[in-house]
Image (cartoon, grey):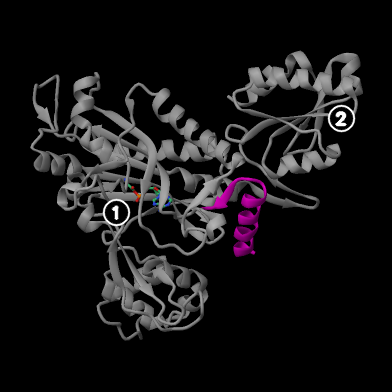
Amino acid sequence: MAENKMEKLTALFKRRGFVYPGSEIYGGLANTYDYGPVGTELLRNIRNLWWKEFVIRRDDIVGLEASIISHRKVWEASGHTVGFSDAFVDCKNCKVRIRADQLIEDYLEKNADTLEKIDVTELILPEGLSFEDVIRYIQQKKVEGFSEAQLDSIIKLHAIPCPNCGAVNWTPVRRFNLLFPIKLGIVEGEQSLAYLRGETAQGMFINFENIVNSTRVKLPFGIAQLGKSFRNEITLGNSIFRTIEFDQAEIEYFFHPKKENWEEIFDSWKKLMWEFITERLGVNKENLRWREHSDKERSFYSKKTVDLEYKYPFGFKELWGIAYRTDYDLKQHAAASKHELSIVDPETNEKIIPHVIEPALGINRLFLTLLCDAYFEEKDRIVLRLHPRIAPIKVAVFPLLKNRKDLVEKAREVYQILKKSIDGKILWDDRGNIGKRYLSQDEIGTPWCVTIDFDTLVDNTVTVRDRDTTNQERIAIQDLANYFSNKLL
Ligand code: GAP
């Protein structure tokens, strides 16, 4: 059923213009996707809401839009050219290439019952794995941070079959870097090498000095950025969950390491993340959980990392991460660039290298999360119960009959009023009958449909139909704008 849900969602994405496979008319390009008209609106609404919440409405956070193409030295200093890699295996039988951690974790997830029965005390330890390693991956079903040799051992121990062809015939696990190198200009060699950014975060560290010098920020303060990142990922299905090009929304929240308690800042950000997802976006709390990274799993730059995970149809996976990056990045860039990346404490005149807490969200992954959470099949309809704040279309306007000039004219009037007064897309539909129009809007998550009928011509009221309850009420045309605007705050 769960995997079935993913198939149904993917079909809906294409059928209704949320997401299409990338470069489809040329046979497709793996791990790339294009967003259709409805998906584009949803994506924009998510981006705008995040920006409003974490930049516009806050006095202590400033925005940044750094270049996607960046100097190779940025990524050398940050450690990404060496430390930012994935381990993968190839199936010798069907040639499919899969991330080793993904292969193992999917297997462990699907075989959870069998694993519980394994008597670990009896187990002959596979090469390279300690008793604790075995306990950890069996209990947590996670292998992030395991070495190539350890991953090899686990694949062999369980004789994990290829999900594509069923063979158990793998190459050894190998590692490759996720950054996309690019060549600038026509000159070959080191000088022309640059990278597409692998995370938005680095733009904020390398502009730290610029921001301190050009604004009036004082600690604690954050720099926020929302934009594309690129990773040469290998993925196997699951739609847009993991792609090679995706939007990240990240905040680097800088603070005085001696005057502020990092654990308190960390916890207050966790609270804000939770509220954003559950209250502002209405995601079901039962489908969410926090998971802290073990020492082995944590990225090279982090002292503590916790993931907010969502229960996708293919299991609990990371939606939003929060990490305590200490002063690692500023120190790395200061050393490599010979710029002093510090800020003066106005009370002591001391130069401080701030520490940083980083909430890092993937906008496309949030898009998928919201759609998984909103998708419901009812007796006679499919409905997306998206929060009205981010619904792609806010209101659909229908004349009861397409061939009645008086109804169409009145409906056009209402349509124009709503287009001018509502912050979001309003849609006109006069095809088919009202019932079909409702079903069509339910499938793309439109919270309200407004019908202009014969009573409207007499008393200037319209029928407003609610997507979730399917209840209908009569509202005066003059009250409509306020009625919807209040619900969209
Ligand atoms: N600056 C820290 C950082 O980039 P990350 O956990 O690698 O941390 C942050 O990425 C978020 O970006 C993830 O929680 C996820 O939502 C999203 N993300 C990462 N890789 C992605 C990919 N290949 N496709 C889609 N979203 C991705």
| Location of residue 182 in the rendering, given as x and y in whole percent from the top left corner | 28, 50
Q: Nearer the viewer, residue 354 or 264?
A: 354
- Classify residue 121 by image quadrant: bottom left
Give SS at disc 1: loop
- Looking at the rendered structure, which numbered label has been put on residue 179? 1
Give SS at disc 2: loop
Disc 1 residue crowd, few under 14, some 14–19, many 20+, Cα 10 Å: many
Q: Quadrant of the N terminus?
A: bottom right
- Residue drawn at x 37%, y 37% as measured from the top left: 269
**Residue 28 showing in the rendered view:** yes
- Tell me the residue that label 2 is attached to: 400
Asked if residue 167 is positioned above or below residue 350 in the image, the reply reads: below
Q: Is residue 112 left or right of residue 142?
A: right
- Classify residue 442 by image quadrant: top right
Q: Amino acid at mark 2?
A: Leu
For the record, the magenta segment spans 1-22
**Residue 119 showing in the rendered view:** no
| Location of residue 340 in the rendering, given as x and y in whole percent from the top left corner | 10, 33
